[in-house]
Amino acid sequence: MPNPEGQIPTVCLMGASFSTRNHGVHALASGTINALAEAGKDFALHFLDYGQEPVLNTVQVGGQMVSIRTINLRFSKRPWQANHILRLLFVASLARCLRNPSLRRQNPWLNQLDNIPVHLSLAGGDSFSDLYGRLRFLYVALPQVLVILLGKPLVQMPQTFGPFGGLFTRQLARWILRRSALIYSRDREGIAVVRQMVGDKGPRIEFAFDMGLGLDPRPPGPKVLDRLAKIPEPENLVGLNVSGLLYMGGYNRRNMFNLKSDYPLLIASLIEEMAGRLGLQVLLIPHVVGAPANPESDETACNKIIEQLGPRYQGRLHHLPEPLTHHEAKYVISRCAFLAASRMHACLGAVSQGVPAMALSYSQKFAGVLKAVGVAEIADLREVDTPAVISQFKGAWNRRAQTRRELASRAPALRAAVLGFFQRHEIREIFEAKKDVSP
C-alpha cells in the first residue's frame, strides 16, 4: 500500500477469516491478504470475528510468515459480556450521542477498533443477504453497524448483495450500504442492484473480481499425493465437489433452496454417468470440512457417497485419505481434467488454474460471478432436472479441450486483477485519507 508517511497501514477485515471450516471463506481471506502484500510489504491486518478468545493466526505470504490477531466479538445469550456485539453497539451509540469518545476508549474492544483507520467487509462473499435466514444476516451485519457508529470508513469488498426477502433485512442492508465509503460488487449485474438500494447519491459502486481468485495452491501431504498418483488415467479424472448443505436439504432439511431434483439422487446419477457409462475416474473433493461434527460438511456427504456407491464403482470412485487446507484443495483441483462443483469457490479454484468447470448452482450468486470469469457451464439446479444436468455435463466434458485453451489465456489476467486490487486509485484514496466519517 502506498504509504508516504512511512507508517504501517493497519486494516481490519470482517466476514472472512480462518475460523470457519469453509474453504471458500478461507480463499477470500487469503486472496485479500495476498493483495495487501502485493500492494506493500508492510501492513498490519486484524480480523474482526466472533469467538471466545482473541486467536492469533500465522499465515505464509510470499515466503514470509505474517501474524494476524483476531478482535473477538461475542454473539451469545449473555449480552452483558464486555465484548458482546449488542453491548458494544450500545456503548458506541451512547458515545456518539453524548459526543464523548472517552466512553469508547474505556472498552478494550472498541478502543482497538477505534485505532484502526480502515475497515473491510467481505460478509463471507454471499452472506450480505437473508437467503440463509435473518439471524445469519444479523451475524454479519451488526459488526458493520458497529464500525459505522464508530465513524470509521467501511469498504464493502467484492461480494454478492442480496437477495432480501424481508423488509427489516432490506432496510438494514440499505442503511449499511448508504454509509459505506466504497462498494464493490463481484458481478456486474450487482452494481445496478446496489445502486437501486442506495440511490443516486449513495457511495461509489465498482465491479471487482472475487478475491478468492488470489488464493495460491500448495501441494498437500504425502498421503494425499500418493493417493493422487495411484489414480489411473489422469487425463480422464473428473473432480466432483458435493455440497453437504445441499445434501442435507439446506438448513431446514426440507429442500430449502427449492432444487428441482432430489440432490442426493442427482449426485448418484451424475456419478453413474461419469464412472459407469463414460468410464471416467471420479474424485470427490470436499470444500467445507469438519465431519462428523459439522452436518453441512462436504466430507459428511462424501463419506455417505463412498459408503453407498464405493463398492459399485470400485477403482473409479475415489476420495482423499485426510482433510485438506484451502491451499491444498486448490492444488488437488489443478490435477483434474474437469471439475463439477456445487461450491462456487471450488469452481473459481478450477478456472483460475485453467481447469474447465461446471457449476451445480443453487442461488443467484453463481451466474454473475462465474460468467465474469468465463465459466459458461452453469446448471441452475432450481431450474433444471437431473437429465438436463447430465446432458449439460456431457457437452461440457466433450468441449473441455477448447475450454482449457480459453481459460489458459484468461487465468493470469484474473489473478493479476485480484492481486492489484489495493492499487486501484479509488481504494488508495480511502487508505490515504483515513478520516473518520459520520454515519
Image: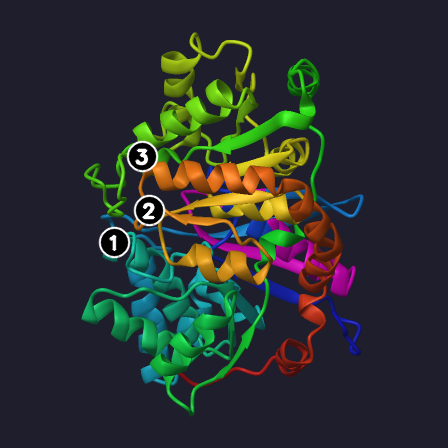
Q: Is residue 82 shown above or below 317?
A: below
Q: Mark 1 points at which residue?
A: 133
Is 42 positioned to the left or the right of 298 in the image?
right
Q: Mark 2 points at which residue?
A: 384
Q: Mark 3 points at which residue?
A: 263
Magenta stretch, residue numbers: 30-56
Can residue 429 be seen by looking at this rendering? Answer: yes
Q: How crowded is mark 1: few (under 14 residues within 10 Å), some or many (20 or more)?
A: some
Magenta stretch contains residue 43: yes
Identified by mark 1, the residue type is: Gly
Q: Is residue 33 shown above or below 293?
A: below
Q: Is residue 40 shown above or below 59?
A: below
Q: Is residue 438 shown above or below 128?
A: below
Assign a secondary structure to mark 2.
Answer: loop
The quarter holding residue 38 reads: bottom right
**Percent position (x, y) of residue 341?**
48, 39
Mark 2 or mark 1: whose residue is earlier in sequence: 1
| Cα distance in 3D space between marks 1 and 3 | 21 Å
The quarter holding residue 33 reads: bottom right
Is 364 positioned to the left or the right of 169 in the image?
right
**Percent position (x, y) of residue 346?**
54, 42
| Cα distance in 3D space between marks 3 and 2 | 12 Å
Closest to the camera, between mark 1 and mark 3, is 3
| Cα distance in 3D space between marks 2 and 1 | 25 Å
Q: Residues within 10 Å of mark 3 (few under 14, many from 20)?
A: many
